[in-house]
Every structure is written in structure tokens, then in C-alpha cells.
Amino acid sequence: MPHVIIDPESTSLQERFALIRTPRKSRKRYPEGCVEIVDSLDAARAAADDTRHLHPAVVYGPSVSSESQRIYYLVRWL
């Protein structure tokens, strides 16, 4: 798992519960289109679905990449 540097003074970047749509869990960052933010840990776990490749996680972001895409960094899988 990558070490993500969290900026505690940031007003736009936050740790959030999410569902990540991905067939493999080896990446360190995910484009915004693959990430669905949810309200809680319970909501993320309840909506997880391996058959649809929806995996619960904690993410940090969104941040703008060098390619001008909004991305989320994986903090940890739930």
C-alpha cells in the first residue's frame, strides 16, 4: 500500500469512504470516474459487490494529476 501524505490544513482534499470499480486491486490511484463516494463505512461495506468489481475503500482526494485528471489516492481497502 502506498504511503499517502495527508495535508491536515487542506480544505478540498479529504479522506473519504468510497466504492472503487476495478477488476484488480493493485493500483495506488484511481480516476474520479471509477470512484463513488459514500457516506459511511457501513454504506461502503454494504454496497460492495465482487461480481461488479465494486470494492470498499478509504480514499484521499480528489486531486488533479499531471495529466489534468481528477484522481483519488487509495489509503486502504476495507
Image (spheres, grey):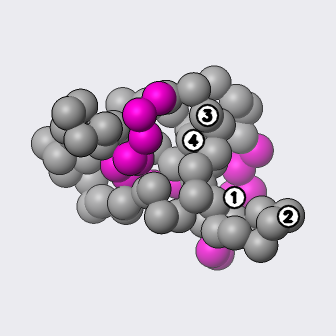
Estimate the spatial distance between the alpha carbons at disc 1 and disc 4, rounded to whole Å: 17 Å
SS under mark 1: loop
Res 53 visible? yes
Q: Quadrant of residue 28?
A: top right
Residue named by callout 4? 74
Q: Please rate how many residues cluster around mark 3, counting C-alpha atoms within 10 Å: few if below 14, some from 14 to 19, many from 20.
A: few
The quadrant in which residue 48 appears is top left
Residue displayed at 69% across by 58% down: 8
Residue to which mark 2 is pinned = 66
Is residue 11 depicted above or below 51 in this figure?
below
Viewer-side label of 1, 4: 4
Q: Do labels 4 and 3 touch, CB within 8 Å? A: yes
The answer for how far apart the CA atoms under marks 2 and 3 are is: 17 Å
User: In front of the other: label 1 or label 3?
Assistant: 3
Q: Nearer the viewer, mark 4 or mark 2?
A: 2
Q: Secondary structure at mark 2?
A: loop
The residue where tag 1 is placed is 8
Q: CA distance from mark 4 to mark 2?
A: 17 Å
Residue 46's disc number = none
> Which mark sits nearer the N-terminus, 1 or 4?
1
Inspect the image, locate mark 2, and give the three-letter code of the amino acid beneath it: Ser
Please identify the residue farthest to the left as the structure is shown.
Answer: 46
Which residue lies under the disc numbered 3?
27
